[in-house]
Image (spheres, rainbow, N blue to C red):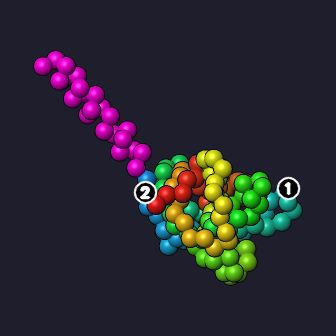
Amino acid sequence: MRKLALILLFVIASVPSLMAQKSTEIDWKFLSKVDFVDKYFEEYEAWYLFPEFSEPIKKLDGKKVKIKGYVIPLDVEDNLYALSAYPFSSCFFCGGAGPESVMSLKFKGKPRHFDTDDVATFEGTLHLNTTDLDTFNYVLQNAQEVE
């Protein structure tokens, strides 16, 4: 009986950590709930759009999420990839979309080969970037392709 109680206690104690590992599925409409203000950056001597994330988005900072989009290989040798709400021809840096429609993919390991505009779903830890102007406002860390 004592063994059974210990096993039951272990299972109950493990449930919250198992549940915490589950990812939240998000979409680009959700990520569009961000405002931008012009902010001057001395080091670049230029004005840039600075994100002011909504509270629901802030709650997912550092959490495991899943999102689907168009893969844009930026520099395959250096493992630099972006995920976009739109195909390359309409994406943030090529078309008329905003910075909320693209995120950096930081892979856990070396990813498989992706062609521009491959549609894929990724899971990883969402990081809200407000300081590094050399990367996007949304970063998916430890990204892994799923489904």
Q: Is residue 98 left or right of residue 26?
A: right
> Which segment did they paint magenta?
1-22
Report whether residue 117 is seen: yes
* Numbered marks: total: 2
Instruction: Name the residue at 68% across, 71% down.
Output: 116
Out of 7 and 115, give the one closest to the viewer. Answer: 115
Q: Amino acid at mark 1?
A: Glu
Q: What crowding class fits label 1: few (fewer than 14 Cα within 10 Å), some (14-19), or many (20 or more)? A: few
Q: Position of residue 119 (x, y in %)?
A: 56, 70
**Could you say whether the residue bearing mark 1 is in a helix, strand or loop?**
helix
Instruction: Name the residue at 21% across, 29% down.
Output: 8
User: Residue 54 magenta-drawn?
Assistant: no
* Residue, disc 2: 24
Q: What crowding class fits label 2: few (fewer than 14 Cα within 10 Å), some (14-19), or many (20 or more)? A: some
- In the rendered image of this protein, does residue 16 appear above or below residue 122? above
Out of 116 and 5, give the one closest to the viewer. Answer: 116
